[in-house]
Amino acid sequence: MTATAIAPTTSPEQPVQENRGSAVTDWLKSQYALYILVALLLVATITRGSIFWGGTNLTNLLLQMSIIGVVVMAELIVVLTGGIDISVGSTLGLAAVVAAGLFGGPSVLLALVVAVIIGGIVGAVNGWLVAFRGLEPFIVTLGMLALARGLVYAYGNGIPINPKAASSFAQLGQTTVIGIPVLAIIWLAVVGLIAFLLYRTVWGRRVYAIGSNIDAARSSGIPVRTTLWSVYILAGLLVGLGGWIFLARFASGTSTAGNLLELEAIAAVVIGGARLSGGFGKVFGALVGTIIFAVIANLLSLLNVSTFLQDAFRGALILVAVTLATVQFTRRRKASDSTTPAAK
Amino acid sequence: MATLQREDSPASPETRDIAFTAVGVKKHYPGVKALDGVDLQGYAGEVLAICGANGAGKSTFAKLLAGVQTPTEGEITVTGYPHPVRDAAEAEQAGVLMMHQEPLIIDDFTVGENVWLYKLRAGRDIRPWATKVDTNDSRTRDVLRGVGLGHLRTNQKAADLGPGQRQMLSLSRAAVTKHKIMILDETTASTSEEHFKDILDLVAREKAAGTSIIFVSHRLNEVFAMCDRIAVLRNGMLVDVLKTSETNPDEITTLMIGQALKALDRPDAVAVTDAEPVVSVRNLYGGTAKGVSFDVNPGEIVGLYGLVGSGRSSVARTITGQKRAVEGTITVRGQEVVLDSPGTALKKGIAYLTEDRRLEGFVKDFDNGENMSLVVLPRMAKAGVVDGKREKKRIRELISEFQVKGGPKTYTSSLSGGNQQKVVVAKWLEADPDFVVLDEPTKGIDVGARSNIYQIIHRVAARGKGVLVVSSEAEELLSLCHRILVMRNGRIVGEFNPDDEGVDTDALIRIALHSDD
């Protein structure tokens, strides 16, 4: 029906067929978080090798990771949409103390339900304000940070709350399956679930689309608001679960539970290569980020560094890692430009 | 467009001063030679066009000249500057002014402040503690009048301007900066025909002042209206440099794509039976549209023509759910619908291809595959879980069907405008809509990809779907559509059949401007 002659000569650039080998090298090149981790493990092996790799320490390390690890996954999905949740620490504390204190904390299962519901409610409020009222996630969750922490202090008057079932909590915290603590298994299951949701489902694709280009997502018929809301609710549920894990680990709901956790969660997500403006980030990266933070905290206490200096070290690591991330990012962008430089 | 006359040819360029000299300029990227040895000279007081298909290297050349990128080999020297320019700051000192395709405007600044933006630059003569320039004085107003923006208030926020006005605002800086070379990189891509005259005036003034002007474009009618010489690039090589007075658009097109492009024939209208219209719009209000009524029949390609602000985009956006209608009814295949979101429109079988691809068309962090399946993903999933194999298979089929350059894993944002548009078209057609609205479907797309897009539009209509093409290019609509509606001030003021006697570009522009006599 149309008579046209399109010269194939208009295509000077042809995509270079990538072989599998170069794909692996490319992947390895972008995993700088992994190298930080390897370096840390080397330092640990050299300085305190025997203690660090000891069974007790490793179990301890895994337990430490499972609390923050679940929160990191919550932070990751929020960051992928281009948002941020700085209320995760306070919400975790709230979930932990209420789960410990409500009805006197008679059972582990009831505590789980309570903790998850508390987290879900907080997430739903955050998400509703962000998605349907169009408020800035930073401001919304900043308010929630203060609100939830205030409720934590008010609930227990600043005194740690010990649930009636403290002994079963403690038992759960120490239970292991083939040497791996149950709490760590729960954490890894959460990681698997998030990976599945993000990579395999329509919902996951929508999360990435919204984070990368909200206008294109909207005009492609994606239900932007409900998807955003669901992200915050899911994040809240996960944080609530984190509060329960906290309870299982320490068998007590302290009013400082989860304090400054948002800092580590955001840092772990960023070190893992996610972009704070949204649309880019991987579960694996966030997982590595989680491990880095746990290892560094562990290592610093093994090296007898004072608690005050530990915070400074952690802050410094965040700055170094974020700087590295920008270096890496510009390099990657240049590389992707160069594939089709002539295209304007 | 046809009525615009080119400024008279200047004295032979050889007698004029050389403004810049490019010698053996090469720009290689890994695997690709964007520019492969270009020798070119520009003269003061002359307009030089750089033409080429997408990917020919014309934008790369402009970037090298402006110092945004550095050549791999060869060098560009600007007369009066001691050594070849190495970066953007040096190029600026040497007097190169680059007008980017995307205008550099700070939204939160006023129109006046945007004119004087360069005053904020660091430099020897611009101290940070210097007092702020008055941006509301008569000088600023003169500058704005010079680019056809005299009706704007200088203290108005730049965010309120339309795309054409933004481009003109950024061009106004030519009047306040010192420069010897001015590069217009696809500057007319986002402006409409009415601003073109202002650009012509500006170029004429610059020319008289002895500026060497580089116009990077593939819109040949504008090139011929504006330029003295035309340099044609193809695959990174300089094919030829011709005087405008000694050549014609056909010759340039042939040089650009390497072989002759035959005219595009409009297919016969699918026999419009008395079947009910795909879409009928009655008395629609919304945005700048004030009481619009029309029908689109199955198999029909309807064109919607109008100048910027005539309400053509408002109509397109309201009937596709991008924007809510204030009043009026929209009926899809006999059923009245309320379109409150693009999602609802999609469910009713309406697709909207945006005019702004980068902003709304595709997701920049997604590869071709992910972008193509974005709309129809729920259909490729079971209980929300994507069927990966099915998705991949379908994407491969789509890529070959729509002749998209690059594979499923190529990032859409790295493709040329034409290929990006193909991805966006594929994404929407995959949803199998009954009614497709295309807003400026060939904006910023070169000749070859253009005819691809036209073919696709024809195929859609041939399957009995309704198509509405919104465009500011009368010529495009005349060759593509079965029926053309012209809008002015929010109303439809004319309906044309392109096959009728006397229906041509002039007729459409006249009625759109309301100067029928």
Image (spheres, coloured by chain):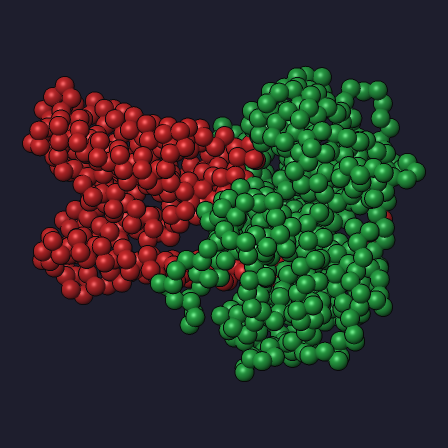
Along the line of sight, the residue nearer the viewer: A188 or B50: B50
- What is the x, y in percent for residue A282? 40, 47
Chain coloured green in the rendered structure: B
Q: Quadrant of the C terminus of chain B?
A: top right
Residue at the top extreme, as displayed? B335
The hue in which chain A appears in the rendered picture of the protein: red
In-image side of B126 versus B31 (left or right): left
Hey, which quadrant is residue B357 in on the image?
A: top right
Hey, which quadrant is residue B428 in on the image?
A: top right
Q: Is residue B229 above or below residue B429?
A: below
Residue appearing at x 65%, y 46% in the figure: B421
- What is the x, y in percent for residue B495? 81, 31
Q: Is residue A255 above or below residue B452?
A: above
* Residue B227 in view of the camera: yes
Residue at the bottom extreme, as displayed? B82
- What is the x, y in percent for residue B505? 82, 44
Along the line of sight, the residue nearer the viewer: B390 or B286: B286
Hey, which quadrant is residue B481 in on the image?
A: top right
Residue appearing at x 79%, y 74% in the figure: B11
* Residue B369 in view of the camera: no
Residue appearing at x 69%, y 79% in the figure: B17
Residue at the right extreme, as displayed? B501
- What is the x, y in percent for residue B483? 82, 33
Residue appearing at x 40%, y 29% in the figure: A133
Residue at the front extreme, as displayed? B138
Please tell me how many numbered marks the rendered image carries: 0
In-image side of A58 versus B333 (left or right): left
Along the line of sight, the residue nearer the viewer: B76 or A223: B76
